[in-house]
Image (cartoon, rainbow, N blue to C red):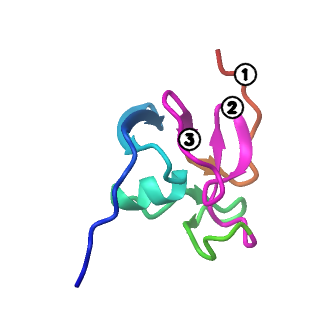
Amino acid sequence: MWQAVARGPEVEIVVDGRPVRVFEGETVAAALLAEGRRALRTTDLRGEPRGLYCGIGVCFDCVMTIDGQPGVRTCQTPVRDGMRVETQAGVGTWRVVS
């Protein structure tokens, strides 16, 4: 018989300027997939969308800018309350987050 898995407490992250309720203990990629988001970044040359591919940190297709740091693998990064996540274009650019 199917049994539900207990989730951690709800926390809030900000994705592209929009607050999103997620569950502590999930990775950023899992939380965004659960919300229905598929594209996490765009390619440098053609601007094509990329999303979660391998899910184990090998392919780097799921990288996003997190708290001002580009190139963070979302499949390996757990969410935390107040985290700021941005869609990354190409290799991304460093930003200072206050």
Give the left or right position of residue 92, taking residue 81 as reference: right
Look at the numbered disc 1 and give the secondary structure of its residue. loop
Classify mark 1: residues with Cα within 10 Å, few (<14), some (14-19) or many (20+): few
Q: Circle 3 — which element? A: strand
Q: Are marks 3 and 1 in contact (CB under 8 Å)?
A: no
Mark 2 to mark 3 CA distance (whole Å): 8 Å
The amino acid type of the residue labelled 1 equals Val
Residue 81 falls within the magenta-colored stretch? yes
Residue 67 picture location, percent across and down:
64, 32
In the picture, the quarter occupied by the C terminus is top right
How many marks the image carries: the answer is 3
- Picture coordinates of residue 15, whole percent (x, y): 46, 39
Return the residue nearer the eye: 46 or 91: 91
The majority secondary structure of the magenta stretch comes to: loop
Q: How far apart in space, not on screen, are marks 3 and 1 (Cα)?
A: 13 Å
Q: Earlier in the sequence, mark 1 or mark 2?
A: 2
Q: Residue at x 22, y 85 (%)?
A: 1
Q: Residue drawn 77% across and 33% down?
A: 94
Residue that extends furthest to the top in the rendered view of this protein = 98
Amino acid type assigned to the residue bearing label 3 in the image:
Glu
Which residue lies under the disc numbered 3? Answer: 86
In the foreground, 89 or 78: 78
* Residue 32: percent from left, percent from top: 43, 54
SS type, badge 2: loop
Q: Earlier in the sequence, mark 2 or mark 3?
A: 2
Q: Which residue is mark 2?
A: 68
| For marks 3 and 1 on the same chain, the one whose residue lies earlier in the sequence | 3
Q: Which residues are magenta?
A: 58-85
Q: Residue at image x 49%, y 30%?
A: 81
**Is the residue marked by circle 2 packed among few (<14), some (14-19), or many (20+) residues within 10 Å?**
some
Residues marked 1 and 2 touching at CB (< 8 Å): yes
Q: Mark 1 = which residue?
A: 96
